[in-house]
Image (cartoon, grey):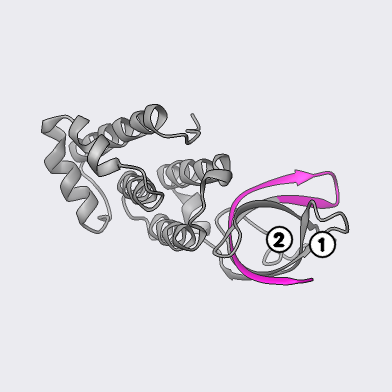
Amino acid sequence: MAEHEEALVLKTEPSGESFLKLHLLTAESGVFLCLKRLSKKKHTSTTPDLFDQAAIILESSQQGTMRFVKEYQLTQRREQIGQSYHSLRNASRLSQLLVANASHMPESERLFVLTARALDAFAQDKAPEVVLLKSLYLLLKDEGYPVRESWWPTLHADLRQSARTLLSQPAPARLEPTAKKVCERIEQHLSLWMRHHTDLIIPD
């Protein structure tokens, strides 16, 4: 039976000469792996790309162990992310985290909305360090981790005001070098807390 879903492309990799492996996120299914047959016609809009948003139709294999993308209709291509090294690096860190922890991500509808907003912010060239920090914090809150109760008290006192401002306000277009370093320190501290106090796999 065909399934119609809106999907975000978190990772792509070739699978032989005829297929593409896609790690997708949908509101209905969460994060999962599927296959798409590569078209012999070189239409860039029909070949999935990293950070795409697309309306897809999925079909299951006869054994039911793998799903295939029968139709792929591109709705948004975020190629702007790839035009900035820092945006690409931080957006990739977020997507790698989601792929690595697919089985730990039960709130798929909220996760889809959070991820789509983050990718839009990366594509709009918002300060990528802030977008990643806010995304990680909101992800932890949505998944029920005691980030406010457990992580926040361990944050150095000289970083708390900056963290409060960064987490409570929309991501700016850019940060001054000093503010950027402060944001990176806060994000590194949060990632370290995630390694020690959650069951999430944190990619290097």
Contact check, label 2 and label 1, Cβ < 8 Å: yes
Left or right, residue 63 beside residue 86: right
Going by the picture, which residue comes out furthest to the right? Answer: 62
> Observer-nearest residue: 195 or 47?
195
Residue 69 to residue 183: above or below: below
**Residue 91 spot, x, y in % from top left:** 46, 47
Say which residue label 1 marks.
Answer: 39
Amino acid under disc 1: Ser
Q: Identify the residue at horizontal 15%, vertical 42% (top origin).
A: 162
Q: Identify the residue at horizontal 36%, vertical 43% (top origin).
A: 145
> Observer-nearest residue: 151 or 116?
151
Left or right, residue 131 beside residue 175: right
Residue 17: tell me if it is visible: yes
Q: CA distance from mark 2 to mark 1?
A: 8 Å
Left or right, residue 63 beside residue 7: right
**Residue 59 spot, x, y in % from top left:** 78, 65
Q: Identify the residue at horizontal 52%, vertical 44% (top origin).
A: 104
Say which residue label 2 marks.
Answer: 47
Q: Is residue 172 magenta?
A: no
Residue 61 to residue 179: above or below: below
Residue 144 to residue 116: above or below: above
Of marks 2 and 1, which one's residue comes earlier in the chain?
Answer: 1
**Residue 177 spot, x, y in % from top left:** 22, 38
**Residue 139 spot, x, y in % from top left:** 39, 49
Find the magenta span and give its range: 1-21
Q: Is residue 4 magenta?
A: yes
Q: Identify the residue at horizontal 31%, vertical 35% (top origin).
A: 190
Amino acid under disc 2: Thr
As drawn, the label of residue 10 is none
